[in-house]
């Protein structure tokens, strides 16, 4: 084989290697965006605090949870891959911190106690045969209400009026999407039946509040 043929083979191999390298670079996922922990408190602190306060109701506890969340995020900064926004990532960490806090506090004060405390109010909805004593009214144009920002202000006010434990239960179920087993474990509820009883009472109270302050106003 002469030198010209050898040169052609070498150049061809080099071209193949270059093409393979370019293909590998093109198929590699982009690096995660740079994040600056120094800005976290200023940019996301208020949102994290509001998230925590809605669920624990104690300002000092909410502040502690924000601090714990930021510390945990700083320690886990290498796990941030940029697949979501920094706020979404921080909120996910906050969610676990809130659940851990609730699990610890409810272990000391089981949520099942609320069933006996609320029995009289719940029974007032029904007569001795188990039928409606005061049937809830029909709501006119509920779909339009869902598009009204003032309706959501009223809804939030009604949620705020719920007993603390029922409010926490409702938020974990309807806002955070926890399943039955997660709620039973987090809130130290003894059985699914108790959970569904408490959710039913919560929804009745919310319905009554909305009828008084929105649909019947």
Image (tube, rainbow, N blue to C red):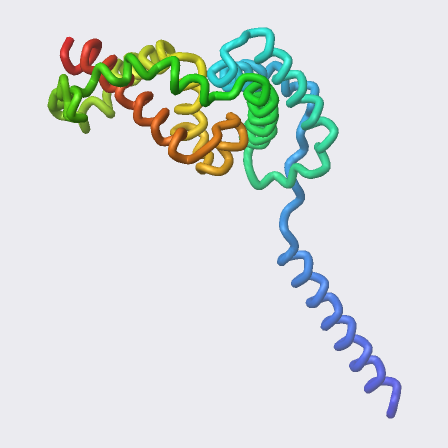
Give the image location of residue 204, x and y in percent.
26, 21
Residue 107 lies in quadrant: top right
Residue 21 lies in quadrant: bottom right
Q: Nearer the viewer, residue 209 or 12?
A: 209
Compared to 165, does 93 lie above or below?
Answer: below
Give the image location of residue 111, x and y in percent.
47, 21
Image position of 153 (left or right of 41): left
Image position of 14 (left or right of 93): right
Count of picture labels: 0
Compared to 175, does 32 lie above or below?
Answer: below
Instruction: Please state, as top left, top right, bottom left or bottom right, where the N terminus lies in the image.
Output: bottom right
Image position of 130 (left or right of 192): left
Residue at the extreme front: 128
Instruction: Please state, as top left, top right, bottom left or bottom right, where the C terminus lies in the image.
Output: top left
For the point 61% across and 11% down, which residue is it? 63
Q: Nearer the viewer, residue 133 or 54?
A: 133
Residue at the extreme bottom: 1
For the point 17% across and 21% down, which residue is it? 128
Q: Nearer the viewer, residue 14 or 142?
A: 142
Give the image location of residue 120, x and y in percent.
29, 13
Give the image location of residue 165, x and y in percent.
44, 17
For the point 56% across and 26% down, which residue is it? 99
Q: Nearer the viewer, residue 207 or 73?
A: 207
Residue 32 lies in quadrant: top right
């Amino acid at each position: 084989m002469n030198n010209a043929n050898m040169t052609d083979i070498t150049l061809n191999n080099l071209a193949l290697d270059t093409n393979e390298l370019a293909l590998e670079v093109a198929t590699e996922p982009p690096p995660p965006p740079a994040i600056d922990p120094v800005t976290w408190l200023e940019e996301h602190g208020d949102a994290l605090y509001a998230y925590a306060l809605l669920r624990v109701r104690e300002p000092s506890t909410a502040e502690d949870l924000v601090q714990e969340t930021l510390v945990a995020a700083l320690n886990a900064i290498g796990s941030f891959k940029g697949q979501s926004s920094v706020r979404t990532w921080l909120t996910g960490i906050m969610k676990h911190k809130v659940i851990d806090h609730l699990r610890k506090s409810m272990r000391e004060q089981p949520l099942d106690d609320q069933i006996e405390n609320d029995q009289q109010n719940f029974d007032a909805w029904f007569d001795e045969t188990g039928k409606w004593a005061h049937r809830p009214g029909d709501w006119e144009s509920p779909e339009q209400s869902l598009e009204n920002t003032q309706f959501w202000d009223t809804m939030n006010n009604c949620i705020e009026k719920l007993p603390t434990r029922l409010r926490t239960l409702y938020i974990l179920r309807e806002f955070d999407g926890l399943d039955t087993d997660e709620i039973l474990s987090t809130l130290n509820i003894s059985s699914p039946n108790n959970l569904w009883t408490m959710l039913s009472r919560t929804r009745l109270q919310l319905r009554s509040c909305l009828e008084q302050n929105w649909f019947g106003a």
